Image: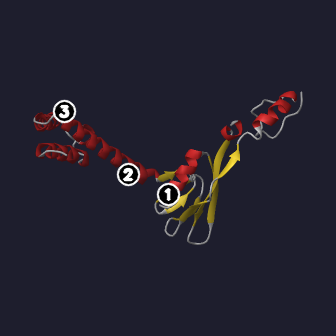
């Protein structure tokens, strides 16, 4: 819970983030930057360390959100597990367009447990005898040496 | 025990579109399965 001064400091920091001209690359001069930082320092002075930390965490979260939004606008939202990208109201894979997002829905079947290394304990000795690696049960096959 | 260690979960994920087409993908591994289940109601 922030005090009034804390709220004021947070608002000033968020305003800075929202305004692209308030950074050196955005047209702000060094003198303006210096004045802005001094004003922040003034606001910060009455706050406890805990409160300062709270404000800075909130600012960092906001900055991350802005960054995510910018990334989503540029590259779309990538749902890696489903192998799709949602961008501009479309669903696509990295290589092709699948369809419109409107009306689309995703379903996942019930999970099944599958063996990754088929019958690992039983097969290992026989594979080893045939000169195969013990963990290569997934490979198509190998000729006996 | 060894058999349990060498197993992993696998699900099929479908994205179904309004025009009747669908996209199917096999999702392997616990982490990916959990993510797919997390995404599916939101899409």
What is the number of the mark on residue A69?
Answer: 2
Q: Chain of mark 2?
A: A
Secondary-structure class at tag 2: helix
Q: Nearer the viewer, residue A83 or B42?
A: B42
Give coordinates of residue A13: x percent, y percent. Answer: 20, 43
Q: Chain of mark 1?
A: A
Secondary-structure class at tag 3: helix
Q: Earlier in the sequence, mark 3 or mark 2?
A: 3
Q: Nearer the viewer, residue A14 or B1?
A: B1
**Dot 2, crowdedness within 10 Å: few (<14), some or many (≥20)?**
some
A5 with respect to A106 (left or right): left
Q: From mark 3 to mark 1, how far is it between C-alphas?
A: 42 Å
Q: Report which residue position mark 3 lands on.
A: A49
Give coordinates of residue B31: x percent, y percent. Answer: 55, 45
Residue at 83% x, 28% y: name it.
Answer: A128
Q: Nearer the viewer, residue A89 or A110?
A: A110
**Dot 1, crowdedness within 10 Å: few (<14), some or many (≥20)?**
many
Taking A52 as reference, is B15 above or below it? below
What is the number of the mark on residue A86?
Answer: 1
B42 with respect to A34 (left or right): right
């Amino acid at each position: 819970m922030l005090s009034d001064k804390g709220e004021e400091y947070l608002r000033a920091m968020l305003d800075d983030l929202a305004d692209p001209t308030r950074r050196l690359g955005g047209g702000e001069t060094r003198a303006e930057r210096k004045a802005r930082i001094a004003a922040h320092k003034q606001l910060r002075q009455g706050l406890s360390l805990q409160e300062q930390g709270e404000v800075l965490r909130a600012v960092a979260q906001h900055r991350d959100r802005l960054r995510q939004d910018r990334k989503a606008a540029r590259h779309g939202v990538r749902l890696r597990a489903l192998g799709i990208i949602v961008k501009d109201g479309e669903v696509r894979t990295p290589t092709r367009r699948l369809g419109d997002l409107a009306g689309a829905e995703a379903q996942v079947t019930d999970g099944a447990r599958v063996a990754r290394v088929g019958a690992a304990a039983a097969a290992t000795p026989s594979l080893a005898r045939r000169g195969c690696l013990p963990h290569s049960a997934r490979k198509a096959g190998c000729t006996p040496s | 025990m060894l058999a349990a260690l060498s197993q992993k979960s696998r699900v099929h994920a479908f994205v179904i579109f309004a025009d009747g087409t669908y996209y199917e993908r096999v999702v392997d591994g616990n982490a990916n399965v959990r993510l797919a289940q997390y995404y599916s109601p939101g899409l």
